[in-house]
């Protein structure tokens, strides 16, 4: 254990304050322009656990599972889609709620959505891209 006299020792109150700040981070939203729909769509920050599962699926050699995981993440983070999925499924003639992602957003829009969701979750996109490039 290193003695780091410049590092503040945290107490109970600090940990409670950190919890409050983490809860505020969960409430972050971003409006993303979806050109194919002609406007902005709001997305909420994904839970870190869900983002890790999605990235884990993407790191495996199963493209179908990776696509399903990404679609579920985008679906889960889009309140407008999630709250009105039954009506949207009927209108877009899809059978599974997460299939709405492919029906509503083109591939480029999905990439932009994922980029924003990763940033809101605190993932370093450039470092991940560099790691992928070097592997």
Image: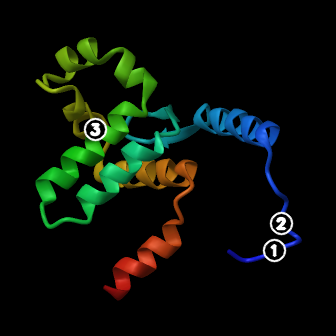
Secondary element type, mark 1: loop
Question: Are discs 3 and 2 less than 8 Å apart at CB?
Answer: no
Relative vertical location of residue 38 with respect to residue 58 in this rendering, above or below: above
User: What residue do we see at 43% from left, 42% from top?
Assistant: 35
Residue 38 percent across, percent down from the top left: 45, 34
Q: Residue at 67% of width from left, 74% of height from top?
A: 1
Q: Nearer the viewer, mark 1 or mark 3?
A: 1
Q: Earlier in the sequence, mark 3 or mark 2?
A: 2
Label 1: few (<14), some or many (≥20) within 10 Å?
few
Q: Residue furthest bottom?
A: 134
Taking the image as shown, residue 31 lies to the left or right of residue 13, namely left
* Disc number for residue 72: 3
Mark 1 → mark 3, Cα distance in angstroms: 43 Å
Q: Are marks 1 and 2 in contact (CB under 8 Å)?
A: yes
For the residues labelled 1 and 3, say whether their Cβ atoms are less than 8 Å apart. Answer: no
Q: Quadrant of residue 34?
A: top left
Camera-nearest label, 3 or 2: 2
Q: Which residue is mark 2?
A: 7
Mark closest to the chain's N terminus, 1 or 3 = 1
Question: Compared with residue 132, is residue 61 higher up or lower down, i.e. above or below?
Answer: above
Residue 135 horizontal/vertical position (percent):
31, 85
Numbered circle sitting on residue 4: 1
Residue at x-position 40% and y-position 48%: 51
Of all residues, the one furthest to the right in this rendering is 6
Q: Position of residue 123 (x, y in %)?
A: 52, 59
Q: Is residue 57 above or below residue 61?
A: above
């Amino acid at each position: 254990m290193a003695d780091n006299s410049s590092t503040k020792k945290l107490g109970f109150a600090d940990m409670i304050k950190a919890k409050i700040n983490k809860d505020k981070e969960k409430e972050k939203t971003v409006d993303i322009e979806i050109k194919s729909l002609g406007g902005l769509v709001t997305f909420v920050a994904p839970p870190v656990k869900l983002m890790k599962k999605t990235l884990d699926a993407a790191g495996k050699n199963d493209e179908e599972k990776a696509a399903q995981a990404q679609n579920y993440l985008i679906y889960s983070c889009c309140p407008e889609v999630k709250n009105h999925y039954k009506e949207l499924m009927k209108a877009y003639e899809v059978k599974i709620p997460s299939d709405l992602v492919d029906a509503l957003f083109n591939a480029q829009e999905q990439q932009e959505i994922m980029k924003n969701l990763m940033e809101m979750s605190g993932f370093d996109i450039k470092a991940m891209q560099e790691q992928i490039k070097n592997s």
